Amino acid sequence: MFEMQWPWLLWLAPLPLLMGIIAPKKRIEAALRVPFYQHASQLEQQNRLSIGKRPAKLLSLWAIWLCCLLAATNPQWVGEPTSMPSSGRDLLMAVDISGSMEQTDMSANGRRITRLMAVKKVIGDFVTRRTADRLGLILFGAQAYLQAPLTYDRNTVDQLLQEAQIGFAGRETAIGDAIGLAVKRLRDRPNASRVLVVLTDGANTAGVLSPDKATELAQKAGIKIYTIAFGAESMEVPGIFGSRTVNPSADLDEGTMMAIAEKTGGKYFRARNLEELDNIHRELDRLEPIEMEAETFRPVQTLFYWPLAFAFLLSFMFAIAHIWQGRTIRSTATNKTTTSAEVK
């Protein structure tokens, strides 16, 4: 449906006509004696021809004025009402990007990849499936940052996750600060929709807020936290006397992660590879949505640039025509003067 935001501006359309009527016309009397009567007669004739084109010029100027007025009214095309998701939750994901996430103990398509690459792949698929939720993203290392606020724009959340790199937030791990930041963002949301998913591969080694204190704040705010401990339990590494088996997740604090989930009414998960991590997120997909107030919006497309572009085009054509006419008159006058001089 076509609409104008300020249609009353169209009442200004007759303004140039009113100014032409109201403004006093100045009469200029010629006081110049012309020595070449024939030349002056020719110039007068050309001037009459130019005046004969005056209605076309006025019409062009009037069209430019109307186009500018139409653009000023801010014309819009308002689309049909579109329903927003009527059920879902506010779900924040806190993803660890500390130095330990560059450990290459994950495997995909027969090749070794880092933990962060595995997380990007699995969580990226998880994000695209959450069509009814408002999603947000927290990245944490030595500090915690809100990378994406709660939004229905899943593509942007996924893109910001894919662009995350090791060391963006420091090399250490601040689990408590990440939970505290999530509490700050979720505490004003409806009670039944406050969900936080924390994924980490280590223990709390940095930050101002301890995991226990952050868990208390989350518990008071009614935030349910699902914790995911990520990392393989065994890995073959080369040594001086051949390969040996090590535990790359020796620093993982599973006890703290279990306590966080238990105190907040969530659940603790352990993911040792990509398959287990994907299964965990598919289980999170089965969370019961809550009913929310239905929201609708009508997409609005602005159209002011079309009449504005047309006015610019008319102005350009008018200027070119005016310059061309001026050159033609000067050229004709010069030729006539030269001819008169040769005759004499």
Image: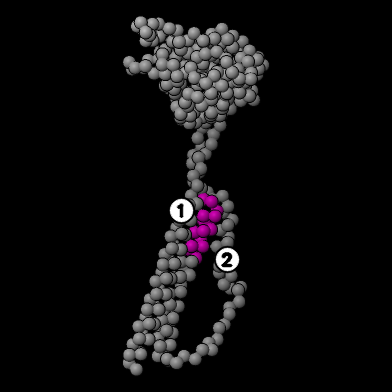
Q: Which residues are magenta?
A: 62-75
The residue lying toward the viewer, choosing from 22 and 30, is 30
Looking at the rendered structure, the kind of residue marked 2 is Leu
**Residue located 43% across and 71% down the image:** 322
**Residue located 58% across and 57% down the image:** 9
Could you say which quadrant of the image residue 267 lies in? top right
Q: CA distance from mark 1 to mark 2?
A: 22 Å
**Residue 15: image tag:** 2
Q: Is residue 119 visible?
A: no
Describe residue 250's horizontal placement relative to residue 143 as left or right. left
The location of residue 209, given as percent across then percent down, is: 64, 18
Which residue is denoted by mark 1 in the rendering? 306
Relative to 315, residue 87 above or below: above
Give the quadrant of the C terminus: bottom left
Describe residue 148's horizontal placement relative to residue 190 as left or right. left
The location of residue 327, given as percent across then percent down, is: 39, 75
The residue lying toward the viewer, choosing from 170 and 253, is 170
Under circle 1, the secondary element is helix
All told, the count of numbered labels is: 2
Looking at the rendered structure, the kind of residue marked 1 is Trp
Question: Is 3 a magenta residue?
Answer: no
Question: Is 67 a magenta residue?
Answer: yes
